[in-house]
Amino acid sequence: MTDILPEKWMKGIAITTTVLAVVASVASSRSAFFIAKAQLLTALEGSQWSYYQAKSIKQNLAETQENAFQVEILGATSPEQRELLTKNLAAYAKDMARYNEEKAAIKKQAEDTNRENALVVRRGSQFSLAVVFSQIGIMLSSVGALLKRREMWIVGLVIGFISLVYLANGFLLFF
């Protein structure tokens, strides 16, 4: 009877370490995926803000040209000259309205990318924590087997359960 109990206990440790190794593997894979995705989203967001700045510079140049046309209209000597300057002024006003619309769309895209990136980083961190806790659980279970200390295995089980919680949270984002 005394030989059967330690044998069952050792099987429990073997199953625990195997399950935690699988959890660590899955969590590590998902963590790497989310880290790579976060890097891509960060680059995309930077590109979107650079595009926004380029549109702002173009808009600023158009505003400067519009102001120059307004000054030239005041000094126009002929009706034809005034009409041409008024047409140019209207064209620049259209450009400025277009730049405002384009900038608003680009800004929305960049902000949406930022929100998506924050979610991706959050998920990736949950998977990273699952890896850490599962590795600690494996280590405690293994040391418990070597030292024949059942309480170390139980602590390893508890920490392994925590890794499962982080793994589930990475997939479902409860908190």
Image (cartoon, rainbow, N blue to C red):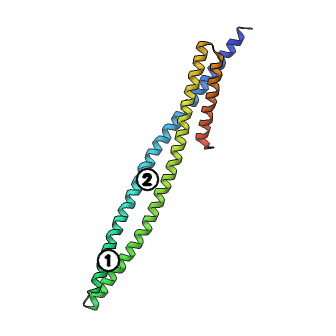
Q: Identify the residue at horizontal 46%, vertical 63% (top origin).
A: 105
Instruction: Using a 10 Å C-alpha cutoff, classify the residue at mark 1 as few (fewer than 14 neighbours), some (14 to 19) or many (20 or more).
Output: some
Q: Identify the residue at horizontal 32%, vertical 76% (top origin).
A: 66
Give x and y (percent) for residue 138.
57, 23
Label 1 secondary element: helix
Label number found at residue 45:
2
Considering only vertical position in the picture, is 140 above or below 84? Answer: above
User: Answer yes or no: do the residues labelled 2 and 1 have beta carbons within 8 Å?
Assistant: no
**First of labels 2, 1 by sequence position:** 2
Residue highlighted by disc 1:
67
- The image quarter containing residue 69 is bottom left
2 or 1: mark nearer the eye:
1
Considering only vertical position in the picture, is 91 above or below 4? Answer: below
> In the shown orientation, is residue 35 left or right of residue 166?
left
**Residue kind at label 1, given as amino acid type:** Asn
- The image quarter containing residue 144 is top right
Calculate the distance from the C-alpha at mark 2 to the C-alpha at mark 1: 33 Å
Considering only vertical position in the picture, is 145 above or below 160? Answer: above
Give x and y (percent) for residue 175.
61, 43
- The image quarter containing residue 50 is bottom left
**Residue kind at label 2, given as amino acid type:** Glu
> In the shown orientation, is residue 104 left or right of residue 59?
right
Find the residue positioned furthest to the top: 2
Q: Identify the residue at horizontal 64%, vertical 30% (top origin).
A: 161
